[in-house]
Image (cartoon, rainbow, N blue to C red):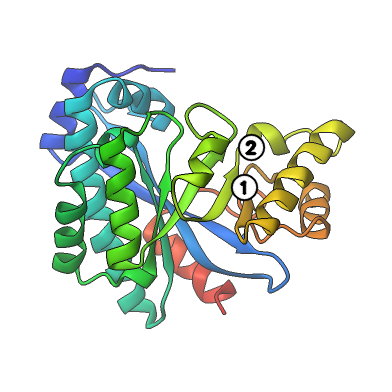
């Protein structure tokens, strides 16, 4: 693994050396795909090295200034790419965009994000924000996300539930429409009964609260069958589709979107 420095990441942002990818999310029962999650999965450095998100995201998450500069670029690019993809396909999709706590904690976050969406021509019903577990929300962040939901009608997703800062207390503070279960919880459900019982219990809790659940890290047909039988709403993982270029994603959506 190559760990990039703050300076390299800042320079890559300046020179537009990041690339975005989309990973499809599968809707159980309907067997369709009309939602995808956006990743900044590749960085190209001056000496043509490449790296995945694990090589640079921990560095970004540890630095507030980088979090904000990367986040603004990420939002704008994800919005523009999403609008272009929907225009090219002539269909509505849901774009799931990762959001760091430090971004939401910025006092003018709600206004700036709304302005970027309007500039790109992205409708609120075509986007959902997936709160990352990597950074903690402040009272300002909670207020901003509540504002974003109430004033714009944007859906909120609690990402990687049960890890990091994605804790159960957030469920009473924010109007989440979906919980995403980390791949760490789904990896061994076909081997260890307690792991399956745990995520089924999470799914049942969410159902009582009127919240849907997406399971990440699906890599086998057996995992997928267990999750569908348990009543999960959506799934994501390499079995369904890896992060792919916007061109490849367009082909995938054409094949599976309802």
Looking at the image, which residue is at 63% across and 54% down? 213
Between residue 245 and residue 122, name the one nearer to us.
122
Whether 208 is drawn above or below 34: the answer is: above
Closer to the observer: label 2 or label 1? 2
Q: Is residue 146 visible from the viewing direction of this image?
A: yes
Q: Quadrant of residue 28?
A: bottom right
* Residue sitting at the far bottom: 90
Whether 109 is drawn above or below 50: the answer is: below
Question: Which image quarter holds the N terminus?
Answer: top left
Between residue 204 and residue 118, name the one nearer to us.
204
Q: Quadrant of residue 2?
A: top left
Label 2 sits on residue: 183
Looking at the image, which residue is at 18% across and 32% down? 12
Instruction: Estimate the x, y position of residue 202 in percent, counting from the top left.
Output: 71, 44
Structural crowding at the residue carrying mark 2, measured as other residues with C-alpha within 10 Å and reported as few (<14), some (14–19) or many (≥20): some
Structural crowding at the residue carrying mark 1, measured as other residues with C-alpha within 10 Å and reported as few (<14), some (14–19) or many (≥20): many
Instruction: Estimate the x, y position of residue 158 in percent, counting from the top left.
Output: 50, 45
Left or right: 84 in relation to 197: left
Q: Is residue 52 visible from the viewing direction of this image?
A: no
Label 1 sits on residue: 237
Closer to the N terminus: mark 2 or mark 1? 2
């Amino acid at each position: 693994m190559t760990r990039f420095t703050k300076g390299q990441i800042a320079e890559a942002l300046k020179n537009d050396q990041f690339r975005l990818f989309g990973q499809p999310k599968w809707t159980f029962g309907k067997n369709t795909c009309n939602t995808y999650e956006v990743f900044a999965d590749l960085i190209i450095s001056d000496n043509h090295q490449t790296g995945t998100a694990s090589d640079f995201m921990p560095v970004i998450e540890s630095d507030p200034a980088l979090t904000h500069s990367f986040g603004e670029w990420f939002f704008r690019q994800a919005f523009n790419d999403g609008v272009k993809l929907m225009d090219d396909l002539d269909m509505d999709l849901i774009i799931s965009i990762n959001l760091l706590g430090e971004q939401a904690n910025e006092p003018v976050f709600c206004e700036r994000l709304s302005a970027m969406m309007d500039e790109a021509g992205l409708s609120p019903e075509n986007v959902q924000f997936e709160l990352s577990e990597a950074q903690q929300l402040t009272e300002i962040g909670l207020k901003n996300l509540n504002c974003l939901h109430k004033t714009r009608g944007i859906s909120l997703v609690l990402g990687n539930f049960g890890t990091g800062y994605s804790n159960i207390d957030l469920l009473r503070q924010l109007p989440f429409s979906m919980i995403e279960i980390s791949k760490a919880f789904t990896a061994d459900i076909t081997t260890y009964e307690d792991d399956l019982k745990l995520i089924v219990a999470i799914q049942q809790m969410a159902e009582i609260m009127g919240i849907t659940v997406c399971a990440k890290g699906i890599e086998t047909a057996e995992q997928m069958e267990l999750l569908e039988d348990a009543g999960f709403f959506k799934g994501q993982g390499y079995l369904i589709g890896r992060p792919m270029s916007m061109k490849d994603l367009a082909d995938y959506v054409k094949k599976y979107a309802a």
